Image: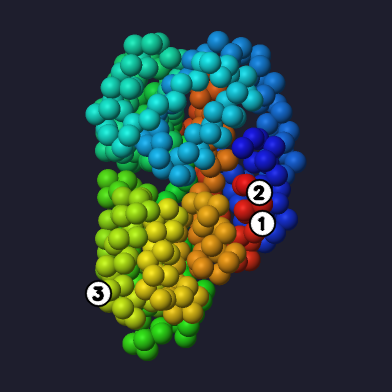
Amino acid sequence: MNLKKGLSFVAALAMSTTLLAGCGGSSDTTTATDSGSSEAAATAAAAAEAGDSDLSTKKVGICIYQFSDNFMTLFRNELQSYLVEQGFSENNITIVDGKNDQSEQTAQIQNFIAQGVDVLIINPVNSSSAETITDMVVDAGIPLVYINREPDEAEQARWAENNWDVTYVGADARQSGTYQGEIIADIGLDKLDMNGNGTVDYIMIEGDPENVDAEYRTEYSVKALKDAGLAVNEVDDQVGMWDQTKAQELVATALQQHGDDIEVVFCNNDAMAMGALQSIKAAGRTVGTDIYLVGVDALSEALEAIIAGEMTGTVFNDHFSQSHGAADAAIGFLKGDTVEKKITCDYVKVTTDNAQEVLDSVS
């Protein structure tokens, strides 16, 4: 995936009624209608500035919590591509797989520090380990960009208090959960309440409970239903650890135990939603007819399922804006610029109305 593709995506969504905000500081956001021509100009200027600072000699260490994660695969590939476009040498960009093991990732970070990398971009295995990671990296005098998994507010406050070269670039998971709930709420109780008990009966398949994204998506998807005035009933809540096979097993068991009492399946990501879909089909249920299913990430297979009417909706986790924002933050640190301590990117709600458009743009 290249930068041109990313900009095409922004432009395409700007032409539709979907709202897309690019990455900005904690108090600055731009909408798609603002970002079409201005983003292209800003990108060209950033590239020119990057070239002046001779980024080709700078070493970048990138830690990903787990290579097998579908979304983080999209993210890291786009991140590497964009870094090269900005002037970094591909030979100086090293990306390592934490294999979902915090002790292994910690050793990888220590190895990067020993190698004397110029900047670190870290997708932590456990957000709760951020304080330890920050202390190691700051003590080594290396700028640090956290991605995707957000350290808590107390940790972020330390960065500001000490004026450290540390930032977080990512999307607010509360928004993704809210969008999931809104997709379901927009269907209306008359269609959702298939068993006639006056409530929306749902099961929740959560990601890693250590991950704040999983916590927020779980909480805010249900909150959005309540905010829409709908009564809700949690039939089951299970932890799928972001894994398709695990989710398939959990949803199969839930459907066997609760049958028609399940009207909605919420999944914290699309990989688990695809596993859920397999079990829904195996149980003889039909999405959009007697059950509804939503995920997060807008993986290609999920978008294809929405287009085929086999999935209700998803939320685009914008790996273009997030990866580019992370790279731009790293460049800012290397140039000695002031970088915001938190840089946020908006999610995009995806239904049958825009699924093909999104698929065309990310394929």
Say which quarter of the image contains residue 3.
top right
C-alpha separation, residue under disc 1 versus residue under disc 2: 6 Å
Residue under pointer 1: 357
Say which quarter of the image contains residue 231.
bottom left
Proximity of marks 3 and 1: CB atoms separated by less than 8 Å? no
Proximity of marks 1 and 2: CB atoms separated by less than 8 Å? yes
Indicate the secondary structure of the residue bearing disc 2. helix
Q: Nearer the viewer, residue 219 or 57?
A: 57
Q: Nearer the viewer, residue 170 or 73?
A: 73
Other-residue count near label 3 (Cα within 10 Å), few / some / many at <14 / 14–19 / ≥20: few
**In percent of the image, x 31 and y 50: which residue is there?**
241
Q: Residue furthest bottom?
A: 196
Q: Amino acid at mark 2?
A: Ser
- Is 156 rendered above or below residue 206? above
Left or right: 37, with 149 as reference point: right
Q: Amino acid at mark 1?
A: Glu
Locate residue 209, reporting x and y percent: 27, 50
Residue under pointer 3: 257
Other-residue count near label 1 (Cα within 10 Å), few / some / many at <14 / 14–19 / ≥20: some
Indicate the secondary structure of the residue bearing disc 1. helix
Residue under pointer 2: 361
Indicate the secondary structure of the residue bearing disc 3. helix
Comes first in the chain, label 3 or label 2: 3
Locate residue 174, reporting x and y percent: 41, 54
C-alpha separation, residue under disc 3 versus residue under disc 2: 40 Å
- Is 200 rendered above or below residue 144? below
